[in-house]
Image (tube, rainbow, N blue to C red):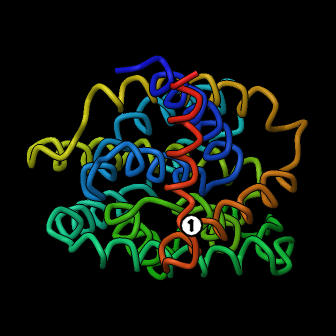
Amino acid sequence: MSWIIITALIISGLFVGFINTLAGGGTIISLSLFMFLGLPPAVANGTNRVAVVFQTLTSSFGFRKQKALDLHKATILGIPTVIGSIIGTWIAIDINARAFEIILAISMIIMLFFVIYKPARWLKGKENLINQKPTFMLLFVFFLIGIYGGLIYVGVGYYLIAAAVLGAGFDLIRANAVKVWVVLLYVPFTLLIFMWHGQVNYKYGLIHAIGNIAGAWLATKYAIHWGVNFIRWLLVVFVIVTVIQTFGFYDFKASVFQMMKSISDV
C-alpha cells in the first residue's frame, strides 16, 4: 500500500469522523474513496463500518463526558434501530451494485432537501417531548431508519438527528449525542454480517479508523462551541458531487485518479 493511499485514508477519515459526529452525511467521503480505490460497493459499504465503530465509540465517550448524552432514552431508541439495521444489512449483502448506487443517489437528493430547506425548522428542539416516553410511532421511525442505516448508512445521521429532535424533543447537541450512541449500538451487528460474508477490507478500514477517531474527538470537544452551518454547506457540495457522479453527468473519480497518478509520478 502506497503512502498516498495511507495518507488519503487517514485524512479522509479525519473529515468523516468530524462531519459524522457534528452533523451527518460524511460517510459519502468514505464510500467514494473506497470505491475509487477499487472496492466493490458492497465491500466499500462493509469496510466503512470498521471505522464507524471506532468513530462512534470515541464520540459517545466524548458526549457522555460532557453530560450531553441521555443514555437511557438513547438506548431505548436504539433497540428498534438495531433490529431494523440487521434487516437492512441482509438486503445490502445481495443488492445489485447499480441498485445500490441509485438508492444512494436518491437518498442524497432527499438529504440535500433537508440540508438546504429551512434546517432550523427540523433542528429546533421541543423541550416538552424530552420527558415523555417514546411513542410506538417514534420507535417505528427509528426501526425504519435502522433498515436504511443497515442498507447504506450514508446520511443516516441526518435522519437520526431529525427523529431525535422532532420526535424526542432533543436540542441539536443532545440529538447528535443520541445519534452517535444509536449508531454505536447497531453498527457492530451490521459489521459482523458483512464480515461473515467476506465483504470487509480490514486494512483499509483500520487505517481509515485512525482519522475517524481523531475527527470524532475534535467534534465532541468543540461541538458545543461550533455550529453546524458550515458543515451543512460542505455536505451540500459532497451530496451534489455524489449525485452527479452516480448518474454519470461527470466522472469525478477519473479526474481524481489522474490527479493522484500525476502526484505519485513526481
How far across and down, in percent of the image, does residue 262 sit? 57, 34
Residue at 52%, 25% (x, y): give it.
265
What is the number of callouts on the image? Answer: 1
How far across and down, in percent of the image, does residue 203 sit? 29, 25
**Quick one: 166 or 31, which is closer to the camera?**
31
How far across and down, in percent of the image, does residue 206 sit? 36, 25
Side of 243 relative to 153 (left or right): right
**Quick one: 51 or 255, which is closer to the camera?**
255
Residue at 74%, 65% (x, y): give it.
236
Residue at 73%, 62% (x, y): give it.
237
Mark 1 element type: helix
Residue at 40%, 78% (x, y): give it.
103
How many neighbours does mark 1 have within 10 angstroms: few (below 14), some (14-19), or many (20 or more)? many
Q: Is residue 64 visible?
A: no
The residue sitting at the top extreme is: 3
Among the 4 quarters of the image, the one containing residue 148:
bottom left
Quadrant housing the C terminus: top right
**Quick one: 251 or 76, which is closer to the camera?**
251
Q: Is residue 238 above or below residue 9?
A: below
- Mark 1 residue type: Thr
Quadrant housing the N terminus: top left
Q: Is residue 137 above or below residue 221?
A: below
How far across and down, in percent of the image, does residue 69 sit? 64, 40
Side of 61 relative to 103 (left or right): right
Q: Is residue 112 above or below residue 168?
A: below
What residue does disc 1 label? 242
Side of 143 relative to 71 (left or right): left
